[in-house]
Amino acid sequence: MNDAVPRSLAIFGLTGVAAFGVNAAGHAWMLWRGNPLVRRHRATLDYRSALVGDSLLLPLVNVLLDRQLEAWGDGLRPSSLRRGRLARALLVGMGLTALFHGYRRRRS
């Protein structure tokens, strides 16, 4: 087994835990404690998009992005982390997040 497979499994697992596992554990904790919020409102885990997206699609996208960056030779090695590239990536990510939040705010 080459180095890419364990790395991909680790990325998939860590992303799955961060995106889905933390939310599921928090929901289970609130149910166990009898928190009224979980009885009054729909939880994230009630949505199919959260179940499929957070547990499968988001980790898969992260694995594919990591493999593509590695194929381009832009992996996360310290020598390839350039401030300009990081700044652009952060700005694009924040811009897209703000755009989606703005859209959702207008629709609610």
Image (tube, rainbow, N blue to C red):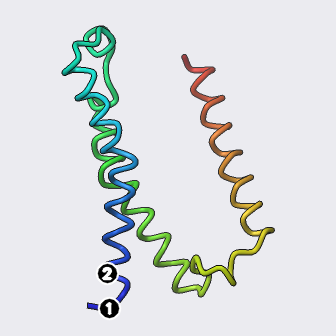
Q: Judge from the rendering whether residue 83 lies leftward or rightward of residue 108; answer left or right.
A: right
- Give me the residue at 65% from left, 51% from top: 93
Q: Secondary structure at mark 1?
A: loop
Q: Is residue 54 above or below residue 33?
A: below
Q: Judge from the rendering whether residue 105 lies leftward or rightward of residue 7; answer left or right.
A: right
> Which corner quadrant of the image does residue 31 belong to?
top left
Which residue matches tag 2?
A: 5
Q: Is residue 44 above or below residue 38?
A: below
Q: Of all residues shown, which one is farthest toward the front? A: 33
> Which corner quadrant of the image does residue 60 belong to?
bottom left
In the rendered image, residue 74, in percent from the top left (x then y), is placed at 62, 81
- Give me the residue at 30% from left, 44% from top: 21
Q: CA distance from mark 1 to mark 2?
A: 6 Å
| Figure disc tally | 2
Which residue matches tag 1?
A: 2
Q: Of all residues shown, which one is farthest toward the left? A: 32
**Mark 1 closeness class: few <14, some 14–19, many ≥20 residues within 10 Å:** few
Q: Amino acid at mark 1?
A: Asn
Q: Amino acid at mark 2?
A: Val
Q: Are dots 1 and 2 in contact, CB under 8 Å?
A: yes
**Mark 2 closeness class: few <14, some 14–19, many ≥20 residues within 10 Å:** few
Q: Name the residue nearer the viewer: 101 or 7.
A: 7
